[in-house]
Amino acid sequence: MEWWLSIPKVELHAHLNGSIRNSTLLELARELGEKGTIVFSDFEHVIRKNDRTLCEVFKLFDLIHVVTTDHKTITRITKEVVEDFAAENVVYLELRTTLLQHYDFA
């Protein structure tokens, strides 16, 4: 494993929304729960799991779309994702995101 981590790597297709740290998602979901935006208990157990069903993964993506709506949060998540890839010695990263139709950028 040490050798694998030491070699330089490229990541040509990583998604920002799929690369959020569980700890960050848990923290942001808790904050949204305290504000009454979501019911935190609906998501807490799914965030903490390591082996999720496909339905649970899609439930998390619904949460991620709610969480990633402001510049400060997206900046934080992006910084953490880049740090995580760098920790695995990724020297080139193509990080993607998907815009949702309901966003109004006007």
Image (cartoon, helix red, strand yellow):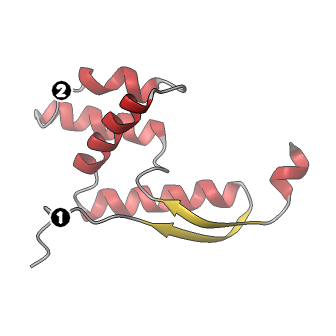
Q: For the residue labelled by badge 2, is the local secondary structure a helix, a strand or a loop? A: loop
Q: Which residue is mark 1?
A: 101
Q: Residues within 10 Å of mark 2 (few under 14, many from 20)?
A: some
Image-based side of 85 in relation to 76, left or right: right
Assign the C terminus to one quadrant of the image.
Answer: bottom left
Q: Residues within 10 Å of mark 1 (few under 14, many from 20)?
A: few
Q: Could you tell me which residue is drawn at 37 percent across and 34 percent down?
A: 26
Q: Is residue 22 above or below residue 104?
A: above
Q: Which residue is mark 2?
A: 39
Residue 35 position by quadrant:
top left
Image-based side of 3 in relation to 30, left or right: right
Task: Return the x and y of residue 80 as percentages of the image width and height.
Answer: 50, 55
Q: Amino acid at mark 1?
A: Gln
Image-based side of 68 in relation to 104, left or right: right
- Pick whichever, 100 or 64, lies toward us: 100
Choose the circle earlier in sequence order: 1 or 2. Answer: 2
Distance from Cα at disc 1 to Cα at disc 2: 24 Å
Residue 94 position by quadrant:
bottom right
